[in-house]
Image (cartoon, coloured by chain):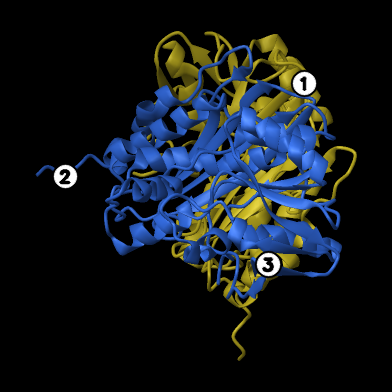
Chain colours: A blue, B yellow
Amino acid sequence: MRRPRTIADLGERGLLRSIRKYLDRPSRELVVGAPDDDAAVWRGDPFVVATTDTMVEGIDFRRAWPGFDFRRLGRRLISINLSDLAAMGAQPRHALISLALPRSTPARDVERLYRGISEQAHRFGTTIAGGDLSATRGPLMATATLIGRITSPQRILRRTGARPGWQIAVTGSLGAAAAGLRLLESGRLPTTRAQRAWVTAQLDPTPQLAAGQALAATLTVGGDISDGLYREVERLTQPARLGATIAIDRLPLADGLRKTQWALAVKDSEDFELICAGPVARMASAERALDRLGVPLTVVGTIEARPGIRLRDGARSVHLEGAGYEHFR
Amino acid sequence: MRRPRTIADLGERGLLRSIRKYLDRPSRELVVGAPDDDAAVWRGDPFVVATTDTMVEGIDFRRAWPGFDFRRLGRRLISINLSDLAAMGAQPRHALISLALPRSTPARDVERLYRGISEQAHRFGTTIAGGDLSATRGPLMATATLIGRITSPQRILRRTGARPGWQIAVTGSLGAAAAGLRLLESGRLPTTRAQRAWVTAQLDPTPQLAAGQALAATLTVGGDISDGLYREVERLTQPARLGATIAIDRLPLADGLRKTQWALAVKDSEDFELICAGPVARMASAERALDRLGVPLTVVGTIEARPGIRLRDGARSVHLEGAGYEHFR
């Protein structure tokens, strides 16, 4: 078998030529697109929302995963960043991509990565405005910076401002991404439809952009739960010395998960879903707005004056070990 | 000796607490600052200029370099990105930082890195609006995305538009960064004042922001020469099937470099200086504008209709092997 052509064979200029078609050409909005100049230029917006997120090989993904594919990895890079914009209720506009690549990387893998980046960005109305390519002697690393807009700084979801008595709700279903990760790490291929959906939730999640914008029109408090539902409820309550109860029997578990697997939806969940909090009446109107988008919104708990996160299964109190993902540990 | 406290000891939350003072608080301009929310929000500008650049340990820097320091590395991360904004004539506004850190990284190194990031950003009127922290099993990697503004899309420097007969000029002096890199790689400490300046040019360059804005007010074609003067002259000429002659006897070599070391200023130069091209009369007025800023502008060549880059030493034609840095090779 012939050795695939690597990026060392191709060189930076050759690589740039091969991915050039995925970088957006100038338009009315994108005045200067990379890589023709030192930076990209675009028409601005009155209020800008910006985020950056990195995926590291060996930490966030492994090429050895069954069914791993660089195109899906590219889509995921955009999705995890779009989810941060969704969490604020913003509309995405432009993306900048920075890749650090081992010299042995097959050139076609980089092209597939960029193809995924470009197709997911375009699906959500985002241009690939620029980027950067570096060599590395370590694992492959991909960073995206996403720039979006909001119409007014009042119309966003923030982590601050939750009040005791408010309901806590989540979009979509929970636990699929964590279940998918376990399957991938076990090296087994998904066999059922539910298992395939778990793997997709991990490898190729869909950011809840429309839902985020709809929530921001009705509510003021929210975020995404990609670091885990438990961790995010902490973030909404701890700084204000508030607490919360989560009703684990009400969690919208992903298809195929058993009731006893609720921890997947609370602790390890890397689900790119949104959380929000608000008074009962407003939550009902948010539910109706999301229903029109075909996105379920499920009340899963309550903000309380007493600090600490309590988990309840019906009337019974339950305990959770080491909740929420923390890097470096 | 006690083992220094690592980021694995500290955990993500502890690390975030230790660098929090370097992240900008909300202000009139920065409506929402990280890390309190999923994304940063700022007041926009009519025309936005954006760039991203990464530094990889083992490729762009080594901790083993004599005098290496994380604070200067942080400053360099901001400077190399600011140089891309300078190359367009933009004014910087906001930065987003993404770090991938080995678990064994001493916590105080990350703090010093962020201290350098913050001080260089603030020196040039830039907020640290947000960022991301990841773990890695590979080398340390730092990415910054810089967002700036221009007053009009007409008032920028582009790589396209050079015409035969135009002069080519560079800001500052050349060759110091490449000379500094050789010294660092040899493991020797700088002993003379000139050598110390070379090392500073490599480890802690100063972006030519004011010069870039002044050039963009007078000229239309320019860029930065951090990939080498030769490579950048190619970029200004090749796409339009033009060529150029560079007069190596006119290069403004950095203090302490001998005339025979001109290749350091042409090929390997990682100098964060600007290049520009324009008609003679305009170039003279650009020179006067930069003179008022205390930045020398030196004419070093001419754009020509004949394709190819020619190097001349007085009347003599000279040859250069393998010019211009390319990643992955």
Q: Which residue is mark 1?
A: B46
Residue type beneath disc 3:
Arg
Q: Report which quarter residue B111 is drawn in.
A: bottom right
Q: Tag 1 or tag 3, which sits nearer the N-term? A: 3
- Height in image: A249 above or below A222? below
Number of marks in picture: 3
Amino acid type, label 2: Arg
Q: Residues within 10 Å of mark 3 (few under 14, many from 20)?
A: few
x, y percentage for residue B2? 62, 89
Residue for point 79% across, 58% down: A303
Mark 2 element type: loop
Counting from the top left corner in percent of width and height, residue B36 is at: 76, 53
Tell me which chain the residue with mark 1 is part of. Answer: B
Residue at horizontal 62 percent and vertical 81 percent from the top: B4
Q: Find numbered disc 3 in the image and state the secondary structure of the residue it sits on.
A: helix
Kindly indicate whether the residues beneath marks 3 and 1 are on one polypeptide chain: yes
Q: Which residue is mark 3?
A: B13
The chain that hosts pointer 2 is A
Q: Quadrant of the N terminus of chain A?
A: top left
- Give the CA distance from mark 3 to mark 1: 36 Å
Q: CA distance from mark 3 to mark 2?
A: 44 Å
Residue designated by label 2: A3
Distance between mark 2 and mark 1 Cα atoms: 49 Å
Callout 2 and callout 1 share a chain: no
- What residue is rendered at 72% in x and 20% in y? B216
Residue B290, compared with residue B109, is above or below; it is above
